[in-house]
Every structure is written in structure tokens, then in C-alpha cells.
Amino acid sequence: MSKSDMAAEDMKWKVEQDLRSLAEAAEIQKDPKRLKAAQALAKEKMAELQKIAK
């Protein structure tokens, strides 16, 4: 397999992964409990990172 074939396969895998990620995000956005939980965790992680960034 040539480098260009490997690069094309890698790009195909990435695009497929992106599609799976977008589909999962859509499912999360449809579920208010999951969305709120994810947002709460994001706020928690942001607060932790802000402590480090100071």
C-alpha cells in the first residue's frame, strides 16, 4: 500500500469518525438530561482549567 493510499484510507476513517461524532452530538442535543449533564461537566472542566491558567 502506497503512502497516498494510506493517506486516503486515513482521511476516509477520519470522515467516518466525524460523521459518527455529529450523529452522536445530534442524539445528545435531543436528550435534555444528557445535554444538561454534558454542559454541567463542561462548566466543571472549564473551572478546573481556569485555575491552572492563572
Image (spheres, helix red, strand yellow):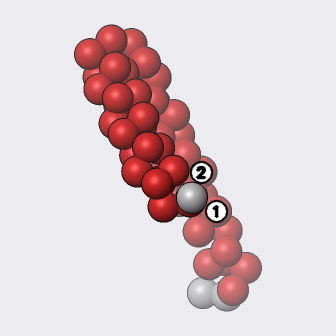
Residue 34 marker:
none
How many residues crowd around disc 1 within 10 Å: few (fewer than 14), some, or many (20 or more)? few
**Mark 1–mark 2 contact, CB under 8 Å?**
yes
Q: Indicate the secondary structure of the residue bearing disc 1.
A: helix
- Tell which of 23 and 31 is nearer to you: 31
Residue type at numbered disc 1: Met
How far is disc 1 from disc 2 in space, using C-alphas? Answer: 6 Å
Residue 38 drawn above or below residue 14: above
The mark tally for this picture is 2
Residue 11 marker:
1
- Tell which of 53 and 16 is nearer to you: 53
Residue at 33%, 12% (x, y): give it.
32
Do we see residue 24 in this rendering? no
Do we see residue 41 in this rendering? yes
Residue type at numbered disc 2: Val
Q: Quadrant of the N terminus?
A: bottom right
View extreme (bottom): residue: 2
Instruction: Give percent across and percent down for residue 43.
Output: 42, 35
Q: Indicate the secondary structure of the residue bearing disc 2.
A: helix
- Tell which of 35 and 17 is nearer to you: 35
Q: Quadrant of the C terminus?
A: bottom right
Residue at 73%, 79% (x, y): give it.
4
Residue 7 drawn above or below residue 25: below
View extreme (front): residue: 54
Instruction: Give percent across and percent down for residue 44.
Output: 36, 39
Residue at 39%, 13% (x, y): give it.
30
Residue at 36%, 21% (x, y): give it.
35
Query: For mark 2, what is the residue?
Result: 15
Instruction: Give percent across and percent down for residue 52.
Output: 48, 61
